[in-house]
Image (cartoon, grey):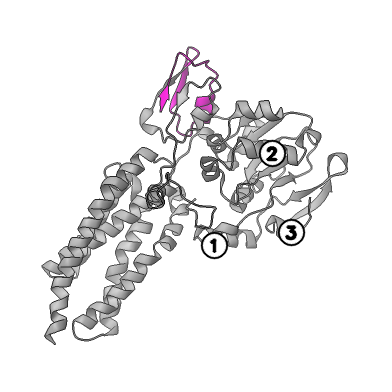
Amino acid sequence: MSANASAIGGAVFKPVVAAKNRHVPVVSNTLSFKDVLAGWKVRWGFGRNNYRVEPGLYASGSPSADSPVLVTANYKLSFDALRKELTGISAWLLVLDTKGVNVWCAAGKGTFGTEELVRRIEAVKLASVVAHRVLVLPQLGAVGVAAHEVVKASGFRVVYGPVRAKDLPAFLAAGMKKDEAMARVEFRLADRMAVAPVELTHAWPFLLAALAFSALLPLLSGGFSMGAFAGNLLLFASPILVGTLLFPALLPVLPFKAFAVKGAVLGLLWNFGAAFALGAGVPETVAFVLIATSVVSFIAMNFTGASTYTNLTGATLEVQIGMPLMAAASIVGAVIAAVRFVPVFFKG
Amino acid sequence: MKLETEKCVGCGLCREVCPHAVFAIETGTARIAERGRCMECGACARNCPAGAIEVQAGVGCAAAVIGGLLRGGSPSCGCGEGSSCCG
């Protein structure tokens, strides 16, 4: 097992002699400033596809042949989330090759799965490291792992631990028992806001369009001015911020189940309010509300991917019904805007 | 998501793996207690040793549905293969 820091994503470690003269890297149980900063950047979508550690066997503390084996994904955010909860706990960390994807998504795709788990157990010769035959998996890994197949193929029994790494110390102390709260996935405000920033970075095409139209409209009206540009930009960028940041914050209080509909309600309120507050004329208001509400609704609909409770049936319905409606509304809004603004261009 | 109680052996794995406490185990048999909370992740079906559960599993992600439609395949985020992931 290579002792190269960059190969395991910068996690601080010191090689240790484990069972049978093997060197297994020992991870630090505290995250460095670099880890925290890099993690924050990844939450905004930067470098997210290459934020990984080498799959394989690691140690926390000074594990022995009786220490528990905790399984995780090789997405460094998952790896860090696990090791930082294990202060004072000696355990083996078995890191699966999920191509740098977190446990939940990888399990859904099958990479955090039965095959990879069995393969990794064999690759690190886990049977020669521990005397017991128990693996602790994060509960959300169950989507990709069939416990009864793992025991048949490897001899190791799967125990599904808590959903969140922070409950691991209590789980282990209780003799591998979890209470109901440890087994439930929530989507509280902090959880929602943690996954919101990446939606903003994904919305760059809308921001680009907002910039373009903010400049185009004053030009069509006879003259560009920084004031008009800035004013337009605030107005046209606001639905994007509403969709990417305000929507996740307000999710539970918005009516209806579909995210696209919740987003449309929020969008209508905001867009009408903004146009009214600015004293915009009727055709401009209608055009703006139609287009901007479609944008908010679309961004909101895409938040389903970051949520922890939407299902495929619902997401499919939202796309099949919502997208044609958004497209139609946007087209009508665009036509009204064109009719309102373009004749001015020809006037002068 | 469908549960065939005749096949159920009462092992309780469905309740253990479900992230939304959809199942309850009563008198040695599993029962769907909260169908509305099911997100169709498929963990229960995957781990049922008796094959008593069937799920049309998939990710509840509109972007994946759109991606699948555009690519002409089944819904998939494509994350981990070059495009950015949402989680």
Q: In the image shown, does A79 or B73 lie closer to the viewer?
A: B73
The residue at 67%/27% (across/down) is A151
Question: What chain does badge 2 belong to?
Answer: A
Identify residue type, mark 1.
Lys
Report the residue marked by disc 2. Answer: A119
Q: Residue furthest right?
A: A21
- Relative image position of residue B37 (x, y in whole percent): 39, 33
| Residue A169 horizontal side relative to residue A129, left or right | left
- The answer for how far apart the CA atoms under marks 1 and 2 are is 32 Å
Disc on res. A41: 1
Q: Earlier in the sequence, mark 2 or mark 3?
A: 3
- Looking at the rendering, the stretch of residues picked out in magenta corresponds to B1-29
Q: Is residue A246 magenta?
A: no
Report how many numbered discs are placed on residues in the image. 3
Can you see residue A29? yes
Mark 1 or mark 2: name the one nearer the start of the chain.
1
In the image, residue A103 lies at what x, y percent? 56, 44
Query: Gap between marks 2 and 3, in whole Å?
Result: 24 Å
Task: Determine which residue is flagged by label 3.
Answer: A5
Badge nearest the viewer, 1 or 2: 2
